[in-house]
Image: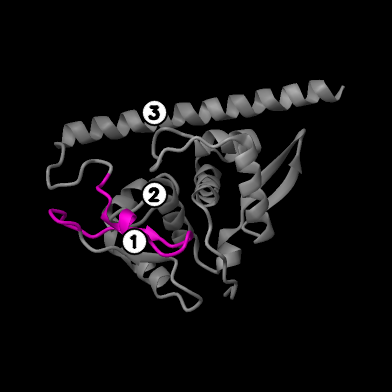
Amino acid sequence: MSETVLPPLSLLESRVLGVLVEKEQTVPDTYPLTLNALVSGCNQKTSRDPVITASTAELQAALDTLRRHALVIESSGGRAMRYEQNIKRVLGVPAQAVALLAMLALRGPQTAAELRANCARIENFADASSVEGFLHELAERAQGALVVLLPRQPGAREARWAHLLGGPVTPELAAAPRPDGGGESRPNAAQHGTSELLEARLIRLEEEVAQLKAALADVLASRDER
């Protein structure tokens, strides 16, 4: 197990790690990612909370910090540098825990049930109880907790979990309303299924656009070198 104690990461640094974990499983043909693909993944409008707009320079600075802590590995691939995550080895946690940390970094605080559903594309959990098992391991980690169970919000059935990659959770984040507005109301099964299908299509489209942008950037860089 790793004994590495990391300094708090910024929102963007955590987001970069989340994107690398996600894209490693969802678009393996273009992984490791180029800088352009990372920019697109971090600025993605779906499956992200909060939605951000980061520049290439900001992404490069975040990558430089993550590389210093060995959380990201840089390699030369074709005509552009490529980046891959190294969380499992540095933090000494299993792949399931890496997936949960990534999803929390991408989507913000979530319940165990939400994490199970949202992780489906990158890690398959048998049930919410198995998710909770890995979360409790991360919360009780000897080298320092990586997640925390937030106080249950008024009107909510379950408490949410948050990652601690950026340091202690602020009171504002703990008290922030859920992106869906919270409360007990839920869409019916048909609406839920349609919403998930549309979101999956949007995510896939954004991934394809990111790949096209990255490929175009590689072509332009190659032309400039001639």
Using the rendered image of the protein, determine whether residue 196 is visible from the camera's viewpoint. yes
Task: Confirm or deny contact between disc 1 and disc 2 (CB under 8 A).
Answer: yes
Q: The residue tagged with tag 1: helix, strand or loop? A: helix
Disc 2 crowd, CA 10 A, few/some/many (<14, 14-19, 20+): many
Instruction: Please name the residue that numbered disc 3 is placed on.
Output: 201
**Residue placed most toward the observer, 58 or 40:** 58
- Residue 212 lies, in percent from the top left, at 60, 24
Residue 13 percent coordinates (x, y): 55, 51
Residue hosting label 2: 119
Quadrant occupied by the N terminus: bottom right
Q: Secondary structure at mark 2?
A: loop
- Give the SS element for disc 3: helix
Q: Nearer the viewer, residue 99 or 66?
A: 66
Label 2 sits on what residue type?
Cys
Q: Which callout, 3 or 1, points at the residue further toward the start of the chain?
A: 1
Q: Is residue 131 above or below residue 52?
A: below
Crowding at dot 1, Cα within 10 Å, few <14 / some 14-19 / many 20+, comes out as many
Give residue 162's quadrant in the image: bottom left
Which residue sits at x=39%, y=39%? 47
Whether residue 72 is visible here, answered yes or no, is: no
- The boundaries of the magenta stretch are 153-178
Which amino acid type is shown beneath numbered disc 1? Answer: Val
**Does 50 sit above or below residue 203?**
below
Q: Residue at x 57, y 41 (%)?
A: 28
> Do the residues bearing badges 2 and 3 touch, measured as CB atoms within 8 Å?
no
Type of amino acid under label 3:
Arg
Q: Report which residue position mark 1 lands on.
A: 131
